[in-house]
Amino acid sequence: MTGEHSESGQRITHLDHQGRARMVDISAKEATERVARASAEVRMRPVTLARIRDGAIAKGDVLAVAQVAAIMGAKRTADVIPLCHPVALTGVDVEFSYIDDEVLRIEVRVRTIGQTGVEMEALTGCTTGALTVYDMCKAIDRSMTIESVALMEKSGGKSGLYRRRD
């Protein structure tokens, strides 16, 4: 286990010398501005998406609740992802877009000035928002799927800029 490496050839640091999980010590890392953007898509029946657009879901304003959920998810990432460091976020932005008559896209952009990145916070935020959309609409459409969860870009830290190519 100690010989495992990432795609970039860096040693995977969440394992100790015996291959056991550990929380990485980031105390020697420089605090820099770090930004990450992730997205998720919720696929549903056209009538469900139309009802979201029209504000006609019985539980209330789906996008308003999903926006708050996405922010809360980003803020609480370290509580649900075991080896993530608690990060003092300086900003979380949530955007919704309609890809077509069946797909709602959720994008979350997270910022901090710190010693570790915020990729997991962005990913947790968009998936929490997507799960909230599902929860609020499941009474009329249990066939919804959450798809294409992905890190779109990140900047800051030693590894610098990453942008998803597709």
Image (cartoon, grey):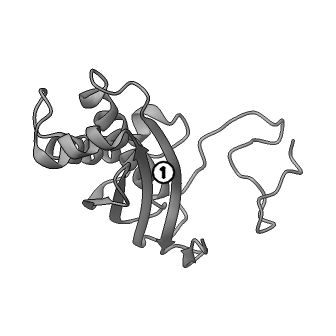
Q: Residues within 10 Å of mark 1 (few under 14, many from 20)?
A: many
Q: Can you say which quadrant of the picture contains the N terminus?
A: top right
In this view of the protein, can residue 71 be seen by the observer?
yes
Name which quarter of the figure residue 106 lies in: bottom left
Quick one: 90 or 74, which is closer to the camera? 74
Residue farthest to the top?
139
Name the residue: 48% across, 61% down.
117
Residue farthest to the bottom?
161
The amino acid type of the residue labelled 1 equals: Met
Instruction: From the top left corner, tell me how far across and down residue 79 is, in percent.
Output: 40, 33
- From the viewer's perspective, tell me whether residue 154 is left or right of residue 68: right
Name which quarter of the figure residue 113 lies in: bottom left
Quick one: 77 or 60, which is closer to the camera? 60
Instruction: From the top left corner, tell me how far across and down residue 115 is, in percent.
Output: 46, 63
Q: Can you say which quadrant of the picture contains the C terminus?
A: bottom right
Name the residue: 25% across, 40% down.
69
Name the residue: 49% across, 70% down.
154
In this view of the protein, can residue 86 be seen by the observer?
no
Instruction: From the top left corner, tell me how far across and down residue 27 is, in percent.
Output: 51, 58
Residue holding disc 1 = 120
User: In the figure, 160 relative to 115: above or below?
Assistant: below
- From the viewer's perspective, tell me whether residue 135 is left or right of residue 39: left
Quick one: 113 or 17, which is closer to the camera? 113
Instruction: From the top left corner, tell me how far across and down residue 56 is, in percent.
Output: 11, 37
